[in-house]
Amino acid sequence: SSLAEKEKDHEYNHLDISAGMKYIISENLHAGITLGFLKGNTKQNYSSLDTSKYRSESAPQYSHYARYFSDTRQNWEHDGDNKYVKFQLSKILDTGNKINFNYGYHQSDIDLANKTTIFDTAYYSGSWSYDDENSNYFHHSYMLDERSAAGDKQKKIHRGMVTFNWQVNEKSKVVIGAMLKNTFEEIVSNEPVDVLRRSRYYRFYTNIEAQVYDNFRSLLEAKTLQWKYQMNSRTLQIPIQIKYNANKHWEFMVAVNRIMTDITVEEKISAVFEE
């Protein structure tokens, strides 16, 4: 027989506030700014239960019994906020062509917290006999893993873009731009871990003379896992769009987008054991 159960619940909420302003400097020059702030919280709880039993026998020569139990419980909570700002400047030239400039900055800070408990135990036993040979055995194992982590995740994004709208003639229009984006992300986390493992195997065997095998193992491990992750990416994007209006029925468009990205990742995981 066996039984398996899983349960998960998830909560999320956030508050997002933003405001913007547009200022007409002149008939051909406009400026704008947007500010925003988002604060949120998310929680998740997860549990898993797995049990099973098994019995097999062929009396009087053979019998076997086994049982297994596993219980896992996890929960994590993230609190964080995002701050962002965007500037925009638009200029209409004397030729009627238009230049747009955009700059945006985004920063997020998230507190990371999680906790996990895993409990596993297994047991099996049996016996068999054949003529004058007899054997009895059992095995029992136990494992308890408890860990909790706390850390911070920070992300910063700078994005700037310039576009030029060029009206070549009455039928043709070209839009060309350049976007430069830089992203920096860092995660720092410390996770204390306590692990206890125990097992025992016992066997009693008789033939001409009795033989006993008894093995017991125990391991207690206490450590702190330290994780540091850094990622820095730089992206250059050059979009070009050409439109041609052949007549009142047909208009053609060709677009080319060139993207170049450079990504650097550094990751370090250290385990500090307690004496």
Image (cartoon, rainbow, N blue to C red):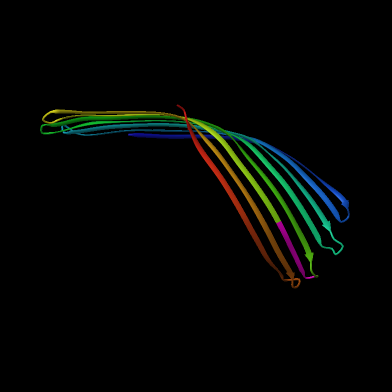
Please tell me in which quadrant of the rendered image residue 27 appears.
Answer: bottom right
Q: Would residue 200 appear left or right of 184 to someone viewing this image?
A: left
Answer whether residue 76 is magenta in the image. Answer: no
Q: In the rendered image, which quarter contains the C terminus?
A: top left
Answer whether residue 174 is magenta in the image. Answer: yes
> Residue placed farthest to the front in the image?
275
Q: Which of 222 and 127 is in front in this view?
A: 222
Q: Residue 242, image x and y in percent?
A: 72, 67
Q: Residue at x 40, y 35 (%)?
A: 4
Q: Which residue is drawn at 67% across and 57% down?
A: 237
- Give the extent of the magenta segment: 170-178
Q: Which residue is drawn at 70% across and 55% down?
A: 179
Q: Nearer the viewer, residue 133 or 65?
A: 133
Q: Residue 199, image x and y in percent?
A: 32, 29
Q: Residue 141, image x and y in percent?
A: 33, 30
Please give the count of numbered marks on the rendered protein.
0
Q: Residue 81, image x and y in percent?
A: 67, 37
Q: In the rendered image, which quarter contains the N terminus?
A: top left
Q: Main secondary structure of the magenta part?
A: strand
Q: Is residue 242 above or below residue 61?
A: below
> Residue placed farthest to the bottom in the image?
246
Q: Would residue 74 appear left or right of 237 to someone viewing this image?
A: left
> Residue placed farthest to the right in the image?
26
Q: Residue at x 78, y 56 (%)?
A: 100
